[in-house]
Image (spheres, rainbow, N blue to C red):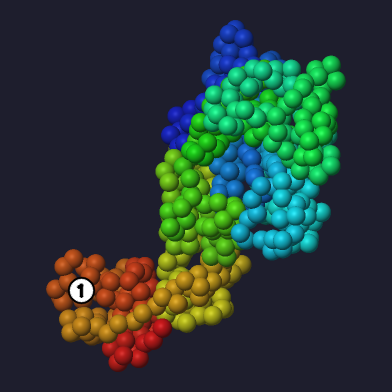
Amino acid sequence: MLQGLSHRAREARSWPFEQARLLLSRVLRLRLSDAERDLAASLFVEGKFLEAVATLPALAQPVVFQCGYGASGLPHIGTFGEVARPTMVRTAFRALTEDALPTRLIVVSDDMDGFRKIPDNVPNRAMLEEDRDKPVTSVRDPFGEHESFGAHNNARLRAFLDGFAFDYEFFSATDGYKSGRFDPTLLKALERFDAIQAVMLPTLGEERRATYSPFLPISPKSGKVLQVPTLERHLDRGTIVFADEDGTLTELPVTGGHVKMQWRPDWAMRWTALGVDYEMSGKDLIDSVKVSNKVARVLGGEPPEAFHYELFMDEQNQKISKSKGNGLTIEEWLRYGAPESLAYYMFQSPKSAKRLYFDVIPKATDEYLQQLDAFNRPSTDGPAIDNPAWHVHRADPPAKGSPVTFSLMLNLVSAANASSKEILWGFISRYIPGATPQSEPLLDRMAGYAINYYEDFVRPTKQFRAPDERERAAMLDLAARLRALPAGCQDAELIQNEVYEAGKVAGFEPLRGWFTALYEVLLGQSQGPRFGSFAAIFGIDRTLALIDQALAGELTA
């Protein structure tokens, strides 16, 4: 699937390919000598990627993509984007190297962080208050389903990622600390404590500098993650000494899960311990990435290739937050739109801020369908690897999309007062002879999404109005034109032409006002799909009945 694309990937303009080329440059720069890089470049140009990997063993080590998840709150769509976007870069990288260089995507849950703030959207808040400041994997699950709140949130995250068939490795920070996976790097951090402090202290306020330590001990008495000064360091024993909450001087090893690191040194420690080559983060973390880069170099590591994306905003233009629970949840998007449309929304303009609220779903769905149709048009140039559908489907888009747009489906639900997919299929099967839910699975899913979206967002806001005299005359003219069409006409373009003519004759200039009137009078809303397409699938007879009802004032929300 990814073979034979390297020559095109070198010229592709979409942002995942731009990132893939930067990442490949990093891998060659860090792993190979000058002579080895020249050899690799010559073999790559000839398409001999497997030979390059066999000849240069350093290229056989996996290229590591990483993304993080803050397990102190429930997953939201921004969390999904943190996995979807690196996956797109990973797919582009695999195409660029013809899948010869092994890759890994590690999803790290920061589930050893201290539980500082209780999310607004969880039950049993009093119980959570009792567990405040403990590692998230030591906080009791307010839902009563898992051994901890961290485990609950991790399960929620993994269930969705698995449902979308992401290829990833889940990694718990708690396991990383307790299993010893991080121990060598933690001991190096202890050894280079002063150098880390030299990086961190200038970034802090005066009061914070006085007590800051890159190590956060976990109190053996209360189980809380403590933000206290490190009073002594013993390199020979690999320990630190601090004052516990009751003032008792306590000595703990920095290994074995007895401490965790402050978040920016923790980030750098993780990059170094796991050999991370690529990680994305939000624009709000640019300064933090710069600091963590310096700490990573102190630890003897090389910071990963970075990409900074803009943040998602809710309907009030506020940053989406796990703790606030604002914006959309993963489950909410999937009630109203296909996962493909969500991935498409993540692909589009990652460096531009975008609203992430319910009203973006129909547009994102229809744009995705347009791109999928464009990808599947016959071409002699091979797959259109810059097309968003190629990235959304990880280089393997389906051969067909949907013959009906989501916006048209919404209006069909509205006009037909459809409460089930079976009602919609009664119209669809007449419009597309032979179509069934089995032959058009995406269309069938969209029918369900449209019913949900209509019931929750369109129906409550529908407001029909009476036509004015010019609009009434134009609708009577349109009705006459539709009656003059051949019986059973389903030619959307022919119907659309008659709609245009009725509007022109009535003097609508521009015609947008005519279409707005049709939607407001007939459908109770200000926008809709191409009216010809709507009438073709709804049926001429039913469209005429709709016009008659509107002119008689019989339509209500």
Q: Is residue 473 left or right of residue 461?
A: left
Work out whether 6 lies above or below 356: above
Image location of residue 167, percent across then percent down: 68, 43
Q: Is residue 338 left or right of residue 229?
A: left
For residue 242, say whether it is visible: yes
The residue located at (66%, 61%) in the rendering is 122
The residue located at (42%, 43%) in the rendering is 352
Work out whether 317 lies above or below 421: above
Circle 1 Cα neighbour tier, 10 Å, few/some/many (<14 / 14–19 / ≥20): many
Task: Identify residue for label 1.
Answer: 503
Identity, as a three-letter code, of the amino acid under mark 1: Gly
Q: Quadrant of residue 245?
A: top right
In the picture, which quadrant includes the C terminus? bottom left
The residue located at (35%, 85%) in the rendering is 546
Image location of residue 421, percent across then percent down: 56, 75
Image location of residue 99, percent across then percent down: 63, 31
Which SS class for mark 1? helix
Image location of residue 407, percent across then percent down: 42, 66
Front-most of residues 364 and 530: 364
